[in-house]
Image (cartoon, grey):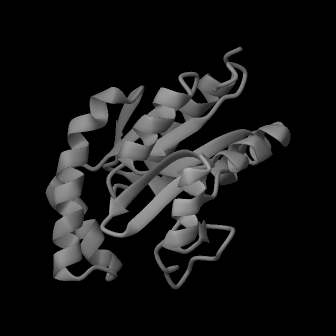
Amino acid sequence: MSNPSHKIIIIAAPSGAGKTSVVHHLIQSLPKRLEFSVSCATRSPRANEKDGIDYYFISAEEFKQRIEKDEFAEWEMVYEGKYYGTPRSELTRIWNAQKVPLLDVDVKGGLAVKRNYPNSLSIFIEPPSIEELKKRLESRGTESPASLQTRIEKATFEMTSRSHFDTIVVNKDLTQTCEVVEKLVLDYLNKL
């Protein structure tokens, strides 16, 4: 299934822990070596998101058809009725461009990619605390009280899986976290 020369970098975290900010930093810092792997999602785009850049926004029906055709390297129903997945075609496209795919995925998705591609580097971005995570999610202004509670419960559960990742980085300070993760990624990229 996986070619040992094909590297993958997995950045996973509970929602609101800072993984997307870390991924953006890595893409800006290492544009000649990394490329963002665009995932598929069945939810509606947020105000600042663009189809084909942030996600491929598709219907649940199309997503299910792609599952049946085994087109995903990993996929999950992350929230009720909301599917997310990494198309195998994205990984192939990036490898063909002589770059390393950089995945921004939820915790279960990260573990699935790690299982399927054991040569990958998996980094878990951990919030300093659940209380801080709740503050970060509230500050987004995108959550109802019910969806906020769902995300907090999911994050609490996801934290129990952090030891299954290669490295855990606690995101107390985003600048410092980005520096630590960039060093980990460079060390991995520079290995034969």
Image coords of residue 40 (percent x, y)? 57, 62
| Vertical comparison of 21 with 182: above or below | below
Left-right relation of 137 to 183: left
Q: Quadrant of the C terminus?
A: top right
| Vertical comparison of 103 with 79: above or below | above
| Vertical comparison of 37 with 138: above or below | above
Foreground residue among 129 and 13: 13
Q: For residue 22, say whether it is visible.
A: yes
Residue drawn at point x = 56 percent, y = 47 percent: 103
The image quadrant of residue 152 is bottom left
The image quadrant of residue 139 is bottom left
Q: Which residue is the extreme one toward the right?
A: 97
Q: Quadrant of the N terminus?
A: top right
Residue drawn at point x = 52 percent, y = 79 percent: 45
Foreground residue among 89 and 107: 89
Image coords of residue 24 (percent x, y)? 58, 57
Left-right relation of 158 to 180: left
Foreground residue among 85 and 148: 85
Q: For residue 40, say whether it is visible.
A: no
